[in-house]
Amino acid sequence: MKALVSILLVLGMVSVIPTASAQSGFDYIMVFLNSNPHRADISAFKTDSLQKGHLDNIGRMAADGRLIAAGPFYGGGGIFIFNTTKRDSLNKWLEEDPAIMADRFVLEIYPLKLHNGKICPQDASAEMATYHFIRFIPDLHKDNVRIETGLLEQHDAFIKSLNATGNVIAQGILDHYDGGFIILKGDLDPEVIQADMAVTEGYYIPKLQKLWIAKGTFCEE
C-alpha cells in the first residue's frame, strides 16, 4: 500500500473522459492519466481534501485486487491497470473517487492485452524502479494506410528484435486501433525507436516517457 500511496502523491488528482469500451480478447483495462490543462483553481484545503479521498479510494481498490498496477510518469501523468474488462464496473470504481469527480485529470481508457510479460501486484514493501515506457500512437492517413499491413509486419519484427535484447519487460496492445506500448529496462537511445519502419513511415507516433513503478509489477526479475 505504501508504494501505491507514494505513486499517487506524485500523480495528484484525476478526472475522467472515457474513450473506449472493453472488448473480447483483452485481459485488463488500462487508464492513462493526463494532466488537465483546464482544471479549476481550488484552495489548498480543498486540494488536501480531494487528495485524501483519492488516496483512500485507490487504497481500497489496491487492497481488494481491483487495481493491480499504478505508476507515474516523470513530468506528470501516469498509468493505472485494473483487473477487469468490464467498463461498467470500472466507471463505478472511478465514480467513487472525489478527486476524479473534481476533474483534476483527463483519462484515456482502453482495453489492454499483454503480449509479453505478466502482472504481479506488489505490496507495500516493493522497491520502486524507473523504466522506459514507449507508447505507439497510430496516425493513419492516406499516405500510409495503403501499406498498413506491411508496416505492421515490420513493426512486429522490430518488437521481436527488442525482445531479443532481454530488455523488454512488457508489451501491451490497446483496443484494436489505439496502438500499444513497450516497457524497457536499462539504457535506451531514442534513435533506436527510429529503426521501426512503422515509425519512420509515420504510421505510429512514438511517445517516450519514464515510468516509476514498483519493481516486479510485470513479474520481471
Image (cartoon, helix red, strand yellow):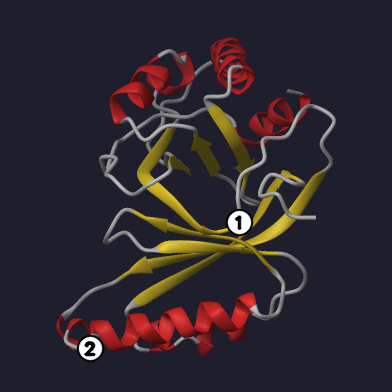
Q: Badge 1: how crowded within 10 Å, few (<14), some, or many (20+)? A: some
Residue 199 image point, x, y percent? 42, 82
Write down the quadrant of residue 103 in the picture.
Answer: top left
Residue drawn at x 41%, y 22% as measured from the top left:
94
Q: Is residue 88 left or right of residue 58?
A: left
Q: Is residue 35 left or right of residue 10?
A: left
Residue 89 image point, x, y percent? 35, 22
Q: Identify which amino acid the numbered label 2 is placed on.
A: Ile
- Is residue 138 visible from the viewing direction of this image? yes
Q: Report the disc number at residue 147.
A: 2
Q: Is residue 215 left or right of residue 135?
A: right
Write down the quadrant of residue 111 in the picture.
Answer: top left
Disc nearest the viewer among 2 and 1: 1
The C terminus: image quadrant: bottom right
Q: Which residue is mark 1?
A: 117
Q: CA distance from mark 2 to mark 1?
A: 29 Å
Q: Badge 2: how crowded within 10 Å, few (<14), some, or many (20+)? A: few
**Residue 46 vertical position relative to residue 193 in the rendered view, above or below:** above
